[in-house]
Image (spheres, grey):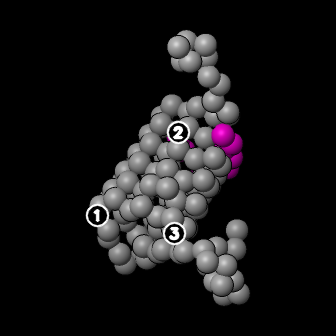
Amino acid sequence: MGFLKKDSDFSSGEHFSVVSAECYFQGTLNVQGSLRVDGTLEGSVDNARHVIVGDGGKIVGDVTAEIVVCGGTIEGNVCADMLEVLGKASIVGDIRAKKMIVEEGGRIDGRCTIGEEQVTEEENN
């Protein structure tokens, strides 16, 4: 994916936040750019552009982002335009996404709603 590679262009104005493997964070993060979690984040992530949970990363809380790539563990609901669940990943919670990819071995325990939401006539009234 190229996230945080050495030749990344930081002049684009994109904001990157990292919870490293040695870190534990508790609270709600309102992230306007991208977030990578390799440690433990206990709380919600709101309004992020990209959220990447590394192999050893864990989020205990809800995640709302444009793109979520989970290689570790998410214990909470996920709402995203695009969700990718990698082979060693685990998500325990409900998922709402426009698109989703689950690699072989990826684990989901919850309800999934995938695709564009359609508004029914009852909801309009």
* Residue at figure coordinates x 61%, y 77% from the top left: 13
Q: Amino acid at mark 3?
A: Arg
Q: Is residue 5 visible?
A: no
Secondary structure state at the residue bearing disc 1: strand
* Residue at figure coordinates x 50%, y 45% from the top left: 78
Residue range highlighted in magenta: 98-108
Name the residue beneath numbered marker 1.
Answer: 26
Q: CA distance from mark 2 to mark 1?
A: 22 Å
Circle number at residue 36: 3
Q: Residue furthest left?
A: 26
Magenta segment: does it hold 114? no
Q: CA distance from mark 1 to mark 3?
A: 15 Å
Residue 61 is situated, as x and y percent measured from the top left of the image, at 37, 51
Name the residue beneath numbered marker 2.
Answer: 95
First reached walking from the N terminus: tag 3 or tag 2: 3
**Quarter in which the N terminus is drawn:** bottom right
Q: Is residue 86 visible?
A: yes
* Residue at figure coordinates x 65%, y 25% from the top left: 118
